[in-house]
Amino acid sequence: MDNQKRSCSRDQPIANSMDKKSPRLSGTSIGNHHLRPRQRAFVMEFLTDFNATQAAIRAGYSRAGAKVTAHKLLTNANVAAEIARQSEDRFRRLRLSADNLIERAAAILMADPRTLTGHHIGPCRYCWGIDHDYQWKTRREYRDACAVAALDDRPEPSDAGGFGFRLDGHANPDCPECCGFGTPRAVFADTRNLSPEAAILFEGVEETRDGIRIRMANKEKAFDILARVHRLFVERHEHTGKDGATIAHDHKVKARVILIPPKVEAPVETRPLPIADQA
């Protein structure tokens, strides 16, 4: 009996200590995966902007080691599974599928940006004027020019070149003024009447100091998505320590990503690329 009492007394503190630690170890349950509170916060923050480093900081992890922490979290099986689960739920709510996203990426890649904007070469004012004199658009434009000249006490301009100048014409290769190069100008489509091809590229308009800027979907990102889906490139990660030596669980690691064309017997290294932040 004494031995049983002593064994029970020795076992009891161990059981109590496990009970105290169990909440910290098990964490909070989300779906079928067990996450700690900060891991759960990281998942929520990561899904807002997909910036892993900033998500780790916002979730309460140390700013100093946020990049390493973010990498650990993304490679944690439970965290990765929860990110995947919530992403699938989001796509389901939005009625989006992987096929929808791939189709959109393909449409962006194949769309012609000239349906949105272009660089046109039109005639200069002397291209089609009579005897290559200055050509006016209309008689009203000429009368307005004469009125301005009178106010400035200048002689009236000449109308010897005639009327009928059009911006949408073509440069005259025999023009002595522009030598056939004409006058360049930027042309933008009316966004109220965009074709489906142009609409998928259009992402907005900005008014800058230099004029109007049309924002378009990124074709390089679309190509990258499709290349990965069709496995046009194989991505390999090589991790090395100082001076290229083999590493042993050292977080101060240099890494490089090498893209190797598929079905190549002897992989050929291309230019090393820096690690992209999880931005």
Image: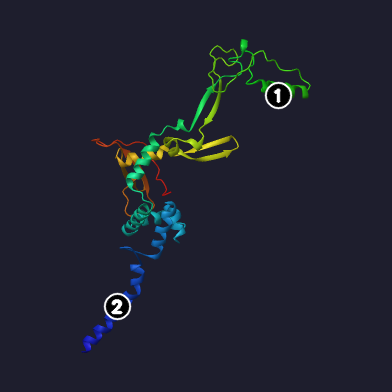
> Which residue is at the far bottom?
1
Q: Nearer the viewer, residue 38 or 131?
A: 131
Front residue of 114 and 265: 114
Q: Which residue is most to the top?
A: 131
State the residue at coordinates (40%, 57%): 69
Residue 264 percent location from the top left of the image: 25, 35
Q: Secondary structure at mark 2?
A: helix
- Kindly tell me whether residue 259 is visible in this rendering: yes
Residue 184 point in image, percent of width and height: 55, 24
Residue 131: name its quadrant.
Answer: top right
Kindly identify which residue carries mark 2: 15
Question: Crowding near pointer 2: few (<14 within 10 Å), some, many (20+)?
Answer: few
- Residue type, numbered disc 2: Ala
Residue found 64% across the figure and 21% down from its top: 138
Circle 1 or circle 2, nearest the eye: 1
Image location of residue 144, percent across then percent down:
70, 24
Amino acid on which the number 1 mark rests in the picture: Asp
C-alpha separation, residue under disc 1 versus residue under disc 2: 98 Å
Q: Which residue is mark 1?
A: 144
Q: Residue at x 34, y 42 (%)?
A: 102
Quadrant of image for the N terminus: bottom left
Q: Mark 2 or mark 1, which is nearer the start of the sequence?
A: 2
